[in-house]
Amino acid sequence: MAVLHLISPLRYTVHRGDDDLLSAGLGLARLAGLPVAFTDPAQPTPAELRRRAIQSGWKGIADLGPLGGFGRLYGHVPDVPGREYGAFARVPHARHPHRLLCQIPDAFDANARCLVVAPSSGSRGVYGAMALAGGWGLARGCAVVYTDKGAGTGYFDCADGTGVALDGTRAEAGSAQLEFEPSPGPADAGIAVKHAHSGDHPEADWGLHVLQAVRFGLAMLDEAFPAQAPFTPENTRVIAVGISNGGAAVLQAAGADHEGLLDGVVALEPNVHVSGRGRALYDYASEAALWMPVALTAPRFASVPFAHAGAVPPPAWLARGAGLHARGLLPSGDRVAQANQALDYLQASGWRDEVLATAAASVAFDLWRAIAVTYASAYLRAEVGAMPCGFSFRTLDVNGLAAQALRAAWWSDGTGIPPDVGIGLFGGLDVSPDPTLPGVLALRELWDGDGVMTPVLHAAVAALSAGLPRADLPVWIVHGAEDGLIPAAFTSDPYVEWLREHGRTPRYWCVPHAQHFDAFLQLPGFGDRYVPLLPYGYAALDRMYAHVVAGVPLPKLPTPQPRPREATALGTASLDLPTR
């Protein structure tokens, strides 16, 4: 166990009856429903927090709406009794811990030993891959091991000195081992977020996190089934699967797996980067935060959800053009011309209109700015209270019981990147009609400027480059052709091209009409335009499992050609899922 670098005792829990592994007893209907209620909102129990964290993990990734087809056309949520093993661990050279969690179903198939390893999507907590890895693997009789890969929602509040214990409850520093406890700082420093403030550059170690999770999962199978031990890479098939940042993590693991721990890799919409190819997330996120608001005011986006409410773009988006013109970044003073000039700029950078259309949601929800702030802080190893460009994460002005209830739900409800539950993104603002412009300009300047921090940021990004997988490791990548958050043209396309140039034979589906956020398909105007990506991930996993467990040759299937459901419920023909 020493090789795992566990820094806490194991937390062992049993989940049967009305509290199973896959849905915490909620089933599909209640997973899709209102958030699980806490008996005492200010002090929820570990069981309540777990149930709500599982629900948040599902709802943040999957389209569970009545028109979406989950549970009817693909996927299901059966009752899966079993056991959980959780711990805090540390990768070599890291200062701060991360979470590992292994779920072992009672129906584990000992005759086809399979371990699914799943890093969380985005910066989510340890249950953040439930809808993909848990939903596919647990019912099949696989054990599933999760890692938060050095991110997660164990937020530390500098004002009261509290963080998150292993069971999800909040505790004061010194009274329990915490998921994240930053270096001592002033009480008014705000909220410390592990991804942003650990100083460990966790993204560069995502591959190590995944490989460590494999070792943890095998060790927990030994713990659960001592009579059948040892569980090893030689007698247990290991499939790594992830979505978004989790997809990047499994591809990083594929390139770092020099011991042959992995038997197959499935990556959905991965935020993958190869040095000298494509574009890094910070580059295009900071660019999008700056230019996309004005570009999306162009008339061609008038019918795009979130872009033109009531046929009129948001006032701040209109003001962005004037602000860029005043700073000499857009030559024209005419609003329509400004939109077209910004659009020309983005298109020259590789953005396509259909990708920009889905990216309007990220602009509307201010995701680009939040991503750029968090990643800049991570890349520059910023401490809480010293984030770049004057930004900070702070609690919103809510007092009394409401504030306690919000704080108690951070771990179960959070996404790992504020703004979040009761936490705001502060700084980088002025009082102009486009108040976020000063901060966005500063964030972009970190990338393409000549300041002292620019080479530091570029060096941090260079450390993210994925390595080349071994020649016999099967890799299947699934990406949405209209992904507006992690465009395939910047990530999967160049990565797949690079693999093929080096003699690898990845399977690659760039699925038409699929975008990044399946959960957004329940929003008005969204689900009728796009198809979910999750069913194609399940289909790839089915074939990867047959290949690594039963030796069935990995098929060379054509990319599915789905079509949007429009105003009706999603149908089988709309998905065009492979039948062989």
Image (cartoon, rainbow, N blue to C red):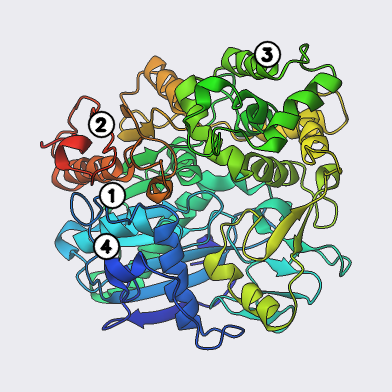
Mark 2 → mark 3, Cα distance in angstroms: 34 Å
Which badge, 3 or 1, is on the more N-terminal residue? Answer: 1
Q: Secondary structure at mark 3?
A: helix
Q: Residue at x 62, y 66 (%)?
A: 154
Q: Which residue is mark 3?
A: 337
Measuring from the top left, give residue 449's x and y in whole percent.
82, 24
The answer to whether residue 256 is left or right of residue 223 is right
Q: In the depicted view, which residue is nearer to us: 223 or 73?
A: 73
Measuring from the top left, give residue 544's x and y in whole percent.
23, 41
Which badge, 1 or 2, is on the more N-terminal residue? Answer: 1
Q: Secondary structure at mark 1?
A: loop
Q: Residues within 10 Å of mark 1 (few under 14, many from 20)?
A: many
Which badge, 3 or 4, is on the more N-terminal residue? Answer: 4
The answer to whether residue 368 is left or right of residue 80 is right
Which badge, 4 or 2, is on the more N-terminal residue? Answer: 4
Query: Circles 1 and 4: CB distance less than 8 Å?
Result: no
Q: Which residue is mark 4?
A: 138
Which badge, 2 or 3, is on the more N-terminal residue? Answer: 3
Q: Quadrant of the C terminus?
A: top left
Q: Which residue is mark 2?
A: 563
Mark 3 → mark 1, Cα distance in angstroms: 39 Å
Mark 1 → mark 2, Cα distance in angstroms: 13 Å
**Residue 45 shows up from this direction:** yes
Q: Which residue is mark 1?
A: 68
Q: Amino acid at mark 2?
A: Arg
Which badge, 1 or 4, is on the more N-terminal residue? Answer: 1
Q: Nearer the viewer, mark 3 or mark 1?
A: 3
Q: Amino acid at mark 1?
A: Gly
Q: Residues within 10 Å of mark 4 (few under 14, many from 20)?
A: many
Q: In the depicted view, which residue is nearer to us: 54 or 421?
A: 421
Splitting the image into 4 quarters, where does residue 465 fall? top right
